[in-house]
Amino acid sequence: MDKPRIRFAGASDAGRVRHNNEDALHVDAERGFFLVVDGIGGQAAGEKAAEIAVDRVRARLERQIGTVEQRIREAITMANNEILEASHRNPEWQGMACVLTVAVLENGSAVVGHVGDSRAYQIRGGRIQKITHDHSPIGEREDSGELSEAEAMRHPRRNEVYRDVGSEQHAPGDADFIELQRVPFSPDSALLLCSDGLSDQVASQKIEQAVERNAGDPQAAVRELIAAANEAGGKDNVTVVVVEGEQFTAPAPAAGPAPRGQSSSARYIALAFAVYIVCSSAYYWLSVRPRLNPPPPMPTGQILAVGPTLKFSTIAAALAAARPGDTVDVLPGEYHENIRLADGVTLRSHTPREALLMGVRMSDAPVVEAVNLNNARISGFQILEERQDNAQPARGIVITNSAVEVSDMEVAGWAVGVELRDSPYAILLGNSIHDCADGVVVKGAGTPWIAQNDIRNNKAAGLRALDGARPAMIGNTFDKNLADVPADMLQTVKEHNRLLNPPPVPRKGTAAAPRKKEL
């Protein structure tokens, strides 16, 4: 994928009326995606919905498996169903939801996913175009021309929406849920994503002028737009993200007629002077001013490298030294150790599938374990069972009461490949889990996400769901497991996954196998 050269900035403000901020945003310029979320539900509930949405959308988009459109659909669906599940578990969060707009840059275009009344605009050549459609009664009337922008902004029912993220269960392909479109993103254009705290207070023409006036300095554009929303009343939280192509500039002013009696040479001198002023200003804004007043840097953690000849020769030592936000990067090789993941730390194989975790058989301890963690990740390893005399097969990965993402792993040869215990926020994404007794075991109420995995050749079950577990399963492939999934989940799993050897359907007139009567 070609990576565009861009300038970008984003910020969120509570406004002048509300004490809390239910908006949220996420900016990942390295991977080229940008997200604005507006929580619904009041006080802590709206903030919680926005937090879940950012976490789930970010997690799915960071794993670049599938097309951009597939990733966006799955990301928003994951957020939707997790918000709904969280509201069922917590009575104080009943009714929470959110609206959101996300844009992913890819090969000269922007793929925009949208639900609700947050917005995406494109600005180019002195024009602003609204990309998204408001999923609201008043927004529909504005889009159809029945109401002017000014009338829609003043309408008392402006804040009503008929689509949101989190109020009912959805699948990625559901009609009338996610609006998805691909639009050109040229180097001389800009994208703006915002919550309705901006679009309900500041007209689109003023939005365009603010972005163009600050061309080359998106941070200044964001500040000006938030200030404009607050000056117009600041009735709502306001969030703005601006993304500029490298050639985005303010349009040249239209040339007017020369004053009567002005000579041709005088006009040329005036034109030359104007060009000088424009070039000098551009140099200042694009070169000098950023050095004088640079935007705040994006927070980044340390990268702790692991290898036989490096400071950290074991993964456990690097994890012990890591802090939240850090990444432990493991060079290719075999690592005979059992490890515990760390809170907020990413553990990854430097080259996918070339770092092997073999484990040390001293007990029934798993090779990889996570207990009571938040926002930890592990990616790219092989976890293979090393057969030993008189040793009973154990577990590859065990996640207990933790929000952990396990992605792009190969897990093979264990009694249980991956076990999730009371971990509704866990994610299994794009893994190969094969030749175990049980591939995946999920225990405890909740809805962990299991997506895009290849689960095959497991001798007992591809997946077991115990103690009330109901994992959300999308895009997985099941093949040649003795049993793919529990019988009561079979129909639901079939709808959104691939079962290559489903149970045979009894022929018409054939008696079903007898069941033992309970005494």
Image: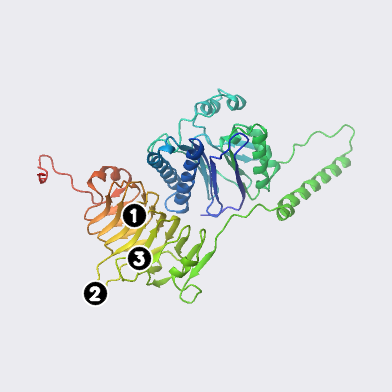
Left or right? Give the position of 431 relative to 130.
left
Mark 3 or mark 1: whose residue is earlier in sequence: 3
Q: Earlier in the sequence, mark 3 or mark 2?
A: 3
How many neighbours does mark 2 have within 10 angstroms: few (below 14), some (14-19), or many (20 or more)? few
* Residue under numbered circle 1: 420
Outermost residue on the front side: it is 92
Pick the front one: 289 or 502: 289
Res 248 visible:
no
* Residue 375 placement (x, y as % from top left): 46, 54
Q: Are marks 3 and 2 in contact (CB under 8 Å)?
A: no
Q: Which residue is mark 3?
A: 367
Q: Quadrant of residue 171?
A: top left
**Secondary element at tag 2:** loop
Q: Nearer the viewer, residue 169 or 119?
A: 169
Q: Nearer the viewer, residue 322 or 65?
A: 322
- Looking at the image, which residue sits at the far top? 146
Q: Tag 2 or tag 1, which sits nearer the N-term?
A: 2
Q: Which residue is mark 2?
A: 389
